[in-house]
Image (cartoon, rainbow, N blue to C red):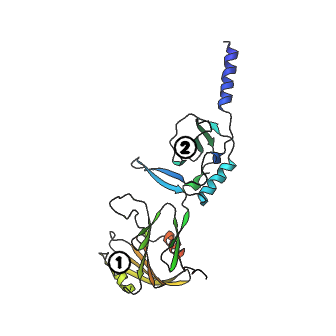
Amino acid sequence: MKRTNIILTIITLLTISSCSTEISIEKYIDLNSTLTLTINKTNDQTGLTKSETRKIEPNSEKFKKLIDWANKNLDNWKSTPASYIAKVAVTQNNFRLLYNQTFVVIGFTDNDGKAQQYSKIVEKGELDFLTGVSWVTYRDTVNVGFVMTFKYPDNLVAENIQNGKCIGDKIENPENDITNSMKWCIWMKDTSDYPIEHFVSSEKSIFKGRVTELRDTISINNSKAFRVTLQSDNRNDPYRQMIYLKKYSTLFEIINNYCADKDFETFYNSLTIDETKKPSH
């Protein structure tokens, strides 16, 4: 083969491999099913990588943002055979999206049953919303008398535990029915069982050092609540903040088991407790 023909062949192959393709991600995912978000974080000191898994629910703000981004980025996808290690991955069945700050890789099975993989350069931080924490609403008919709702971060887990609702980091412990770290809790008690001081004393008994106690009143959903903050001079002792709210013959004890933070304020300020509407006859 002549040198000129070889050069033309190479140019043709390069042109083909660099051609961009228009891809609609909506064709390869189920818009009514949950996406799995995996975030890989590497410890700078140990070099170990820890994976955190979250769910992106259909109709959630994060789901909508991803689809909106995809519809604005239909073109300039280029086929790539390379293997990638991503800091962020979004998966669903045979679909995957890998994000590494400045580029995105998507893989899927096409209509002919063939595995495809494409990459695209993006602005740095363009898909950082994937790892941001969104707040979701928990709604539960606690009993025949009232409905309780509250908001909590979507990277935490909300669960029914005994006579309460607890929100915390997901932990795996098959020997225990408590499967989250109980960062925040809402315990429900009959107002006739014990006075509030009984529960405050019970919480204080956890501490070993000298306890500083601060009491004040706050308003939650237009209802007056009593707040107690406990902190010990012993660094190994836990921090506690308890809020007591009486409504519908029920005492709600809202507890923060960690240090003071704005997220806890957002959590308890989102709490609503409303009477169940009786059916009209």
Residue positioned most to the top: 1
Instruction: Provide the residue designation for mark 1.
Output: 203
Identity, as a three-letter code, of the amino acid under mark 2:
Asn
Q: Secondary structure at mark 2?
A: loop
Earlier sequence position, callout 1 versus callout 2: 2
Is any atom of residue 12 visible in this view? yes
Neighbourhood count class around disc 2 (C-alpha, 10 Å): few under 14, some 14–19, many 20 upward: few
* Tag count: 2
Q: Is residue 211 above or below residue 195?
A: above
Nearer-the-camera pick, 33 or 206:
33
In the rendered image, residue 260, in percent from the top left (x then y), is placed at 45, 71
In the rendered image, residue 237, in percent from the top left (x then y), is placed at 33, 71
Q: CA distance from mark 1 to mark 2?
A: 50 Å
In the rendered image, residue 271, in percent from the top left (x then y), is placed at 52, 75
Indicate the quadrant containing the N terminus: top left, top right, bottom left or bottom right.
top right
Q: Is residue 115 above or below residue 4?
A: below
Q: Is residue 9 above or below residue 69?
A: above
Nearer-the-camera pick, 102 or 44:
102
Q: Looking at the rendering, which quadrant does residue 231 occupy?
A: bottom left
On residue 94, which mark appears? Answer: 2
Identity, as a three-letter code, of the amino acid under mark 1:
Glu
Neighbourhood count class around disc 1 (C-alpha, 10 Å): few under 14, some 14–19, many 20 upward: some
In the rendered image, residue 75, in percent from the top left (x then y), is placed at 69, 42
Is any atom of residue 122 visible in this view? no
Indicate the quadrant containing the C terminus: top left, top right, bottom left or bottom right.
bottom right
Q: Residue at x 51, y 82 (%)?
A: 218
